[in-house]
Image: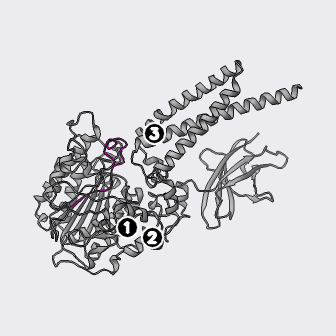
Amino acid sequence: MGKKTAVLCKILFGFGNVILILFATLTTLACASVLWVFRTWPHLTMQELMFTIQSPVEGTNKDMVMEYVWFCVPVTVIVMAVLIACLIITRIKKGYRIAAAVIAAVSVLALAGFAYAAWERLDIADYTADSGTYSSFIDDNYADPAETELTFPEQKRNLIYIYLESMETTYADKRNGGAFSTNYIPELTELAEANEDFSGSGEELNGGTALTYTTWTAAALFGQTTALPLRIPIEDNSMDTQESFLPGVTALGDILEQQGYNQTFMIGSDGNFGGRRLYFTDHGNYDIRDYYYYQSQGKFPEDYWVWWGFEDQKLFEYAKEELTALAAQDQPFNFTMLTVDTHFEDGYVCGLCGNEHGTDQYGNVLSCSSRQVSEFVSWIQQQDFYENTTIVISGDHPTMDSDFCEDIDEDYERKVYTAYINSAVTPEDPEWAREYSTFDNYPTTLASLGVSIEGERLGLGTNLFSSRSTLTEVYGNKYINRQLTRKSDLMDELTEEIDEDNTELKIREGKTPTVTATPLPYDFRTGVLQVVINNIQNADDGIAGITVAVWTNPDQSNIQWLQAEAQPDGSYLANVNVPGFGFATGEYYMDIYVTDNLGNQFLAGNAVGYVE
């Protein structure tokens, strides 16, 4: 064997080792990631996984990210080290081929096994098939509120709608229909049992099922006030990038606005997140009271920020002030609020939280929330406006906490907490324990205000005070969820105005054009510093032009704009006129902007050239 051949063999041998180790290491990381995902979310569905993957990184809990790192990275590094040592040892002892073959085979089998397990557990085949097919379920069962006769009482009742973050009936003890030996929400349990949760003659808590496309906050708020799933052609929490929020939908806020209600939506976080501000202003012209509103009112220091903004202890305090002001006005009011302390992971421990559950932080936070809600309701009941006010309390969706419910029996049906207090009507059949979803909150809330509803249905929801069966009682949740996963002509029509080419949306989703800009050596003979622009990506809407901003002063006080010229090979060339900068030497900073055929301009890259 010649020297060149021997060298080539060594190179190929080394390259093969690198590929083998890299493949085995990535396989280990992938398998560990699958284990972590199913350990963290034992009841994960494919739709929930897609939501998590698509959600903005800034919405992710840092502790959860570190938990993933500590679970997956150490074992991956250890496996990689062991494999490298194994190959070195077997190389010395002439057993390399067998070791390499074993490593490759085990890696392939492990990857295939975990991929198959994930495929089966997430039911990816059905999800893929359903997401690409159409169903007439929504179209056939949708009762258009705009075409349904609604009769309000002569004296309109006020509405207080309290969304409780991640609040489930699950948190009660088994005697009261929960899943635990301890009742984490005794006050909320008492409120539901003393009022209406549609449990009929039963003594256990009853709540609504969160169906597909209602299992995150923005979708839950939308689903409970429109009786429709928030199935949109963009990332689930990106509606804040849009100009409007499904304008063809008639929501609870639209109906109450038409009836002269003064409406307020109150949260302790950023109202823009998930498009919540857009939704409530588009559908009801609500006054938005969020973190930034109260910051501007001087309620707390400008740099105050805990959890997602400010804690529920402040939220309830401010809510009392808002309600007092609303009650002093002549119009009926709809005051809607959303708590946040019980958000995953493990909730926020405020100054009111006790330690009744020891080291169980989420349990302590749930109990604290239960007490605060109960105290708030008691305060409302002592006010003069209470006599003509209905209170609705509802969890927004089941918890996303990774481990609090991991030991619950798989057959236990988890439902969001529900209670109607001081309703204008009572159930037609008080003995009937209803099976219902959060879609049913929409017509039921109106009915609790004394509104007569033609046909007892709105959207995909049914008035639970009536004797008409819900879609859940007719079809079952499993069937409905399967249908909601499929496309719908009605939802296509309602979401047709969503702008998938929206500039802000593209930036968020990483779909804006990108380029590589390479300054060439300065040509002192021509006084030109050329910049080659190529490797253009994500220019799906074509390129109308490429512009280069150039400056040498750190404050950009001498910035100049150049138009790059298209070249036959698809690249672009820009010529920086150095004499135009007074023959300045040193670094020339450049930003490259791509303008597409729709007129949108994007910062696509940058570079630094040098003039001697």
What residue is pinned by disc 3? 36
Q: As displayed, is residue 213 above or below residue 64?
A: below
Q: Position of residue 102 (x, y in %)?
A: 63, 31
**What residue type is disc 1 on?**
Leu
Query: How far apart in space, not on screen, are marks 3 and 2 (Cα)?
Result: 35 Å
What secondary structure is found at the residue carrying circle 2? helix
Front of the two marks 3 and 2: 3
The figure's colour scheme reads: one colour
> Compared to 577, does 544 lie above or below?
below
Binning the other alpha carbons within 10 Å of mark 3 as few (below 14), some (14 to 19) or many (20 upward) gives some
Q: Nearer the viewer, residue 28 or 96?
A: 96
Q: Which residue is mark 1?
A: 228
The CA span between labels 3 and 1 is 33 Å
- Ranked by sequence position, the earlier of labels 3 and 2 is 3
**Which quadrant would residue 612 be assigned to in this image?**
top right
Q: Is residue 402 magenta?
A: yes
Query: Residue 104: where, in percent of width, then height?
Result: 64, 34
Relative placement, left or right, of 447 versus 126 is left
Instruction: Give the answer, above or below, for where 321 lies relative to 21.
Output: below
Closer to the chain start, of discs 3 and 1, is 3
Closer to viewer: mark 3 or mark 1: 3
In which quadrant will I find the N terminus?
Answer: top right
Q: Position of residue 526 (x, y in %)?
A: 83, 50
Instruction: State the image coordinates of residue 519 (x, y, percent, origin top left).
Output: 74, 46
Q: CA distance from mark 2 to mark 1?
A: 9 Å
Which residue is situated farthest in the right direction here? 2
